[in-house]
Image (cartoon, rainbow, N blue to C red):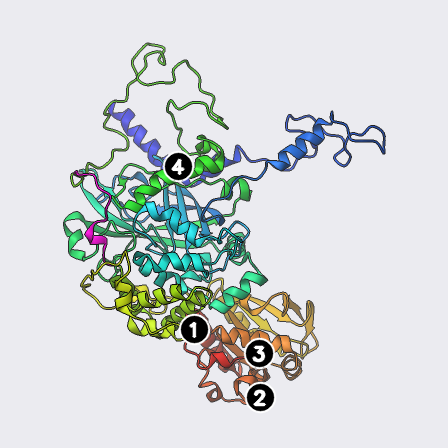
Amino acid sequence: MASTRTGARATTKARAADGSADKLQQLQAYTVDTAATLTTNQALQIPDNHNSLKAGARGPTLMEDFILREKLSHFSHERIPERVVYARGAGAHGTFHVYKALSEYTTAHFLNDTEARTPVFVRFSTATGSRGSADTVRDTRGFAVKFYTQEGNYDLVGSNMPVYYIQDAIKFPDLVHAMKPEPHHEMPQAASAHDTFWDFASLMPETTHMLMWAMSDRALPRSLRMMEGFGVHTFRMVNGRGETHFVKFHWKPRLGLHGMAFDEAQKLAGKDPDFHRRDLWEAIDQGHFPEWELGLQVVSEDKAESLGVDLLDPTKLIPEELVPVQLVGRLVLNRNPDNFFAETEQAAFHPAHLVPGIDFSNDPLLQGRLFAYTDSQLARLGGPNFHELPINRSVVPFHNFQRDGRHRQTINRNAVAYEPNSLGSPTGAAFRVDGASAGFKSYADDTVAPPKQRRRSPTFDDHYSQATLFWNSMAPAEKEHIVAAFRYELGKVGVPVIRQRMVDTLAHVDPRLAKKVAATLGTDAPDTKAAAGQAGFREARTELPLEEAPSLSMQARPDKGGIHTRRVAVVAADGVDVVSLRIVQHALTDAGAVCTVVAPRLGAVATAGGRRLDVGGTFAGSPSVMFDAVLVAGGKDSADTLSQLGEAVHFVLEAYKHCKPICVMGEGIAMLRLLGVEAGTRSADALAGHPGVALGVGDAEALQLTAQEFIRMIAAHRFWDRPNLDAIPA
C-alpha cells in the first residue's frame, strides 16, 4: 500500500508540472476548423447558400425553407446580454508558477508546487462603457485571472486600482446607476464626466480616496501590459495548521508601470478605439509575452490593528512602506483566444471560485459580490450551467447532484440525484459527505457575534487620510494631472451646487488641491465647514505613520521596465540620410524596441544614396499617439520636405506635447523650429530647455552615444516636466 500511495503522489506531481497544457488540450476537444462543406446545425449538407427557396424565380419565399429559417433564427439570437459593468474586455491564455512553496501561509496546491505550471485565462476590461466603447477612456480597468488548478478553478477578480468607491455592496447599484450614461438620454458613453456621477460622489465622502486614483494617471494606462493589478479586498490564507493570515494580492508588470497623457488618450479613442486590445493581441501574436509577478502583502491577525487601517474597508490600502509586497510567482500570457465570443465574452469570473487554503474576509463589499456574481452569470449566460462552457470548465472533473437546467451538457448516468444515497453504488455502499477532512473548509471566524444591525463599523469612518496620503505621494507633474482631470470632469457638470460640494470635499484632502480645482469652475472658495455639514460626513482622521508613500507614485518607481516592445516612429521622406539613421535604429531594435517608418506615403521613400527605405505607415494612418517615441531622420532633402509638411510637423509636435522622447538626426532638427530651436544647429546645448529630446550628430561613435541616450529616455517613458506645453500648437 505504501508504494501505491507513493506512486499516486508521483503521478499527481507529474500532472501538475505538465498542467500548462491541460486547458489547451481540453479546449481543443471543442475547437473546430473551417470545413470544405457547408451544413445546417443538424449536419445536413447545404448545396446553395445564396438563394432562399421561392415559388418560381420571381415568386415569394416559401415558409418551408427550413435552411433560411435556421440561419436567420440563429442570427437573431447570437447576442447575449453584455456585462452590466466591465463589458468592454480583452482576454488571453497563459500560465502561472510559484517561486517557492507558500506552505507557511496556505495549503493551496498551486501556491506550493514550484514545478506546477497552472493554466490561466485573464480578462482585462474597462468598467463603465459598453462593449462598443473605446479602450482608452479614463476609467478603472478590470484585471481578472482564472487559475485552472488541480483543486478546481480559482478566480482572482480584481482591478488596476487597489481601492474602490464604496464600502458596502448595498451601494453598488447606486454607484453604477450614477456612473453609467444618464437614463433620460443615454449619454455620455464610457465617461464619468457628467452630473449624476459627481452628484453621487459629492454626497458620498467614502468615494474620495478612489476619486483621487480615478483622476490620476492610473486611469489612463499606456498598455494593459503596463499596468498593475490588485485583488482590492482583503482575503484570508489558511495553512495546514489552521492558522490564518490576512492577504492583499498584487500583480506587478515586468514591463513597468506606465500611463498616457489625457489628450493622447482622448485622441486614441477616436483614431484607434481598440488600442489596448490590439496592443495586447499583437504583443502575444509576435511572441512578446506579457508578464506580471504575483505579490502578497501578508498581515498576521494580531498585527492587523496596529496598521491604523481597517483591512475590511475596501476604500483603504496598506502602503507598501508599511507592509512590503512579497513577490511569490510569475504570470505569463502566451496565447491569444481562438474565438472572442466563446472564450473572452463567455468567461465567467466569480470571487467565490476558491480553492482550499484561500478564504474570504468580512469585507462588506466582497460579501455582496459573492451573491451578485452568481446572479449576473445566471442572467448573462442563460442559466445555471455556465460552468460547463469550455472556457469555464475546470481541468479536473466536477461531480455533484445538481441536475438539468438550460444548456446542460453533462450526461449523468444512474438514478440518484441526491445525497446521501446507496443506489449509486453497485455494491450498495452508502455515499455520504458529512464532515469529511478533505476539501474546502470555511475559516471558523470567532469574531462574528450578534446583534444583527445595519451600520458601518466606526473604523470605516476615515474617508480622507488615505486620499491625502495619495496626494502627498504624487510627483509635481502627477499632481497637475490630477488637478486637470478634476477640472475637466467637474467642468462637464451642469449643476453648480454639485461642483461646489465637490471642491468643498477636496478641501478635506488638501486645501491647495481644492483651490486649484476650483479656480476654473466658477465656484466659491472651498469650504471645509460646508462639507462637514453634509449627511454622511464623518469627523474621523487616522494618524498614519507616514506622510508620503513613494510606492503610490508612478513616476517615483525606479524600475521603468526597459524599452522592450516600445513602439518608435521613424519620421522620414525622400532624401533621408539612412547611414546615420541605421546606427540609432539598430541600437533601438537590439534593445527590444519596434521601429516603424512613418512617411507622407506608403510604399517606400528614396534615401540620399539612391536606395529605398520601406514605409510602414503614414502621418494620417499612423498618428503619433500610436507610438511611444519619435526618431526624426536626417538628410537635408528629407528635412526640407518634412518641415514644410503640416501633418509631419504636427506629428512631431504632438509627440512632444505628450511628453514622449524624441531624437532628431542632423538636419531633422528643423522639425523643432516652432519650439524655438534654430534649424541647422549642431549643438545639443540648443535642447537644454527641452527634456527628453536628443540630437544625433557626428561620427558613428557619437551616434552610438546618442542611441544609448535615446534608449534611456524611452525607458523613462515620459518627460512630464517639459515647460510651456500649453503653447505647443498640436
Please, what is the three-letter code of the amino acid marked with disc 3?
Ser
Q: CA distance from mark 3 to mark 4?
A: 61 Å
| Labels 4 & 1 near each other (Cβ < 8 A) | no
- What secondary structure prevails in the magenta region? loop
Compare residues 708 and 548 and report the one nearer the observer. Answer: 548
| Labels 3 & 1 near each other (Cβ < 8 A) | no
Relative height, residue 106 to residue 575 (above, below):
above
Compare residues 671 and 635 and report the one nearer the observer. Answer: 671
* Closer to the eye: label 3 or 4: 4
What residue would you read off at disc 1?
712
State yes or no: residue 312 in magenta: no
Compare residues 59 and 606 and report the one nearer the observer. Answer: 59
Please, what is the three-letter code of the amino acid marked with disc 4?
Thr
What residue would you read off at disc 4?
374
* Closer to the eye: label 4 or 1: 4
What residue would you read off at disc 3?
580
* Closer to the eye: label 2 or 3: 2
Q: CA distance from mark 2 to mark 3?
A: 18 Å
| Residue at disc 4, secondary structure | helix
Please, what is the three-letter code of the amino acid marked with disc 1?
Arg
What residue would you read off at disc 2?
679
Image location of residue 674, percent across then percent down: 56, 84
Mark 2 or mark 3, earlier in chain: 3
Image location of residue 198, percent across then percent down: 40, 60
Relative height, residue 418 to residue 680 (above, below):
above
